[in-house]
Structures are given as structure tokens and as C-alpha cells.
Amino acid sequence: MKYSVKMRASKKNNKENLHIGGAESIVDEEDLLNIINSLASRGLNHSRGQADFVNIKINKVREEDIINIRALKTKTIEVDTKEEGLVVMEKLLNSMGIENPQRVIDLLINTKNMRGAIILNILSLKRMEGDLDKGVRVTNMDFANRRDISNKNHFKEALCLATKTLNAKAIIGEVCISDDPDYVTGYLANKKEYIRITKLKERGDLNGGRVFLYDPRLDTIENTIDYLKNQLVIVHE
Ligand code: WAQ
Ligand code: MG
């Protein structure tokens, strides 16, 4: 028997609820209580601040509903400054045939406090998420045989998310910058590769976000969002 466990943490900021972070896992029954413990303490002690509210959701899952996929290949491009990092990103977007890479980068670097991703239609350049404040949160994925979830492994968790996301028929790319102030490495993913770029923002910056590049010729937005939210995926290294 397996369970999906999801954690989301936020804090009050005047009247608003500010997203702090989230994490999740798909685990066997015997690991369930340990994972709940680890995820709760991650939510309560986050680099973005102390939580006022931690939500933990537990769902039983059926093994036959899980699909298994192989992780994207990875590589790293070293840069010294965020300006250099953003130029690398622009060139990579260009080489993927994105006609307006600056629009993608502007969206990415001006995003703050979203708990999900922006979905950008690459033909109309319109945003496709229903809720523009929250965005679309990809969930129901995990690495096979993950051991320790009590500390965030930015690289592993992002590779898992990107692998699930790029497996959606109509998502052809993803760009990401962490919203954690002490983590400046970000990435660009395409159908074949997960490319780490070692500096995309300044240390101490609380902004970060994700933009998914959606090609409407490949699938409907409804199918795409349903897959991103609900399909159970286990990623194998
Ligand atoms: N689904 C969709 N969007 C999400 C999700 C999710 N499950 N989780 C986070 N986001 C969005 C949201 O807007 C966050 O503000 C933003 O992404 C950044 O999230 O190889 O830590 O969890 O070393 O802060 C990159 C690792 C780490 C690079 C990224 O993102 C590397 C990271 P964070
Ligand atoms: Mg974060």
C-alpha cells in the first residue's frame, strides 16, 4: 500500500497568506509517519520564514495508477553572474525555437510568491493558468527509493518535478528560479535535458518562480493541467 503525502506552508502577511514552501512524497505505509514528521518540520523551519500554517494532506494511492518514467539527463553550465546566467537561458530558449525568449525571462524574474507555475502559450504568448495568483502546482510525483526528505535537496526535487512536467505531451520547456533566498542555481529543461545554470539571481533575493512552455498544437490545456496535477508519477534515476 502506498500513500501520497503533501505539505504546504504559509505565513500571514497583513491580511494575505504568503506561500513559504511545499514538498511531497509517495511512500510505503511503513514509512508514512516518518515522512509526515519530516515534511511538517520542513514546513515549520523554512529558509523563507517561520510558518503560521502548515497543511499536510494524505491520500492512499493505487499502485496501478502510477506511471514510472526515467529522469531527464542533466548537465551544468557554470556562470559567474546572474546576468551571464540569464543570457545563457535566453540562448537556450532561442535554440529551442522560442521566438520571444525575453518575454519568458521577464515573466520568470518578475514572479513572486506564487505557489505554482505560470503556463505560457508559446504561440499566443498568453498565460493559461486559471488562477494567475497561485499558478498551477505540479503534484503527485516522487523519486523511486528516496531516503531522506527532512532536508530539502533542491536539485533532486526539481529534477523530479521537471521530469514529470516535461513528460506532458504539450509542455516543451520549463524555466525555474528557486524562491529560497540562499539558493541561486536555476535551470532550463526541455524534452531531452535538464540544464542547470549556476547563478540566476542574487543571494538573499526572495523572488523565484517557474514558467512552463505550452504548445497548444500538441494537447489541450485541460488535459495538460489535469496531467500535471493528478497523474501519479515515479521517477527513476
Ligand atoms: N508546481 C509548480 N510550481 C511550483 C511547484 C510545484 N510543485 N513548487 C514550486 N513551484 C514554483 C513556485 O512559484 C515557487 O515560487 C517556484 O516554483 C520556486 O520553487 O539543479 O527550489 O521550490 O540545483 O523554491 C532548482 C534546483 C530548485 C536547480 C528550485 O524551487 C538545481 C526550487 P522552489
Ligand atoms: Mg522555495
Image: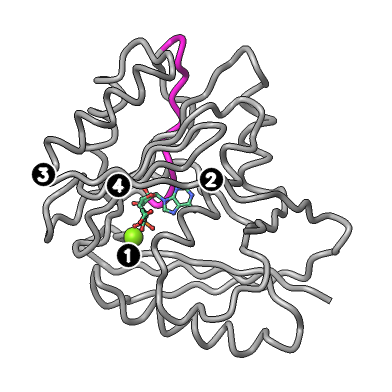
Colour option used = one colour
Q: Which residue is mark 1?
A: 20
**Does the stretch in magenta take in 123?**
yes
Which comes before the other along the chain, label 3 or label 2? 2
Of labels 4 and 2, the one closer to you: 2
Label drawn at residue 177 = 4
Q: Which residue is mark 3?
A: 81
Label drawn at residue 225 = none
Which comes before the other along the chain, label 3 or label 1? 1
Q: Tell me if the residue at label 1 has its CB under 8 Å from ligand 2.
A: yes
Residue drawn at point x = 64 percent, y = 32 percent: 224
**Relative horizontal placement of residue 109, taking residue 214 as reference (left or right):** left
Q: Which residue is mark 2?
A: 73
Which comes before the other along the chain, label 4 or label 3? 3
Of labels 1 and 2, the one closer to you: 2
Residue drawn at point x = 68 percent, y = 86 percent: 31
Q: Tell me if the residue at label 4 has its CB under 8 Å from ligand 1.
A: yes
**Relative horizontal placement of residue 38, taking residue 83 as reference (left or right):** right
Three-letter residue code for mark 3 = Thr
How far, Cα to Cα, is label 1 from label 2? 29 Å
How far, Cα to Cα, is label 4 from label 2? 19 Å
Q: Position of residue 1 (x, y in %)?
A: 84, 76
Q: Is residue 79 visible?
A: yes
Find the magenta span and give its range.
115-124
Give the SS element for disc 1. strand
